Amino acid sequence: LKIIDEKQKLINTLEKKSSDSIENYKSEIEESQKQIKELQQEIKGSQSQISCLMEKTKDKDGISKNLLKSESLETQLKNKVKTINKDVKFYEENDTCPSCKQNIELHHKECMYKEKEDERKEIIESLEMLVDNIEVAEKKLNDINEILEDVHKIEKQVSNKQNQISASSQYISKIQKNIESILNEGTEVQETKD
């Protein structure tokens, strides 16, 4: 009778321990599932944020192409100004044509000088506007690159959260196996009891 009482106490202790373990595991599963839902909501918000940011960067290629064209045009205009300056210098320093050896008339010099000055003035005005446009485009590209850096940071955060979700899912699977193991032990205890 004493042995039976001890076995009964042992069985009751095992059943209580199993029941407590299962309840603890279930509460851990609920906590992990809650954490997964929160992470999924955060990921959804981050993905929405990424979409909004990417919308602001959609014209990056167009800006880059226009910037390259503008910089090329700037170089061409600067070269034209250099050529004009050479021509003006020629008329300032020479009274005779080096090719045909004829005298260059003062009236012709003044006309050429005025023509070249007008041309240079027009090119310099265009060049100033072009430089302003280049500065604006460079600022836009810098802003876009900063946005893309922010997107990259957010994507890293999303990746980390997805890893946390994966780890939590694996943890839930492990706990469920532990519960199954305890339930199997409970069956064995019941068989022993019977």
Image (cartoon, rainbow, N blue to C red):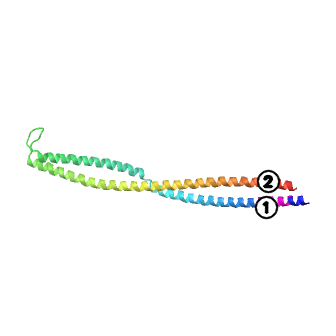
- In the depicted view, which residue is nearer to us: 174 or 165? 174
Say which residue label 2 marks. 185
Magenta stretch mostly in which secondary structure? helix
Q: Tell me if residue 13 is in the magenta stretch.
A: yes
Foreground residue among 173 and 192: 192
Expressed as whole percent of the image width and height from the top left, the position of residue 85 reads 19, 48
Dot 1: what SS?
helix
Q: Residue 99, how many percent across, how many down?
A: 12, 38
Badge 2 marks a residue whose secondary structure is: helix
State if disc 2 and disc 1 touch (CB < 8 Å): no
Instruction: Tell me the magenta residue range.
Output: 7-17
Left or right side of 40 for 83: left
Q: Position of residue 42 (x, y in %)?
A: 57, 60
Identify which residue, 111 or 82, lies in the foreground: 82
Amino acid marked by disc 2: Glu
Above or below, comparing residue 152 to residue 96 in the picture: below
Q: In the current view of this chain or complex, which residue is farthest to the front?
A: 2
From the viewer's perspective, tell me whether residue 68 is left or right of residue 122: right
On the rendered image, what quadrant is the C terminus found in? bottom right
Residue on which disc 1 sits = 16
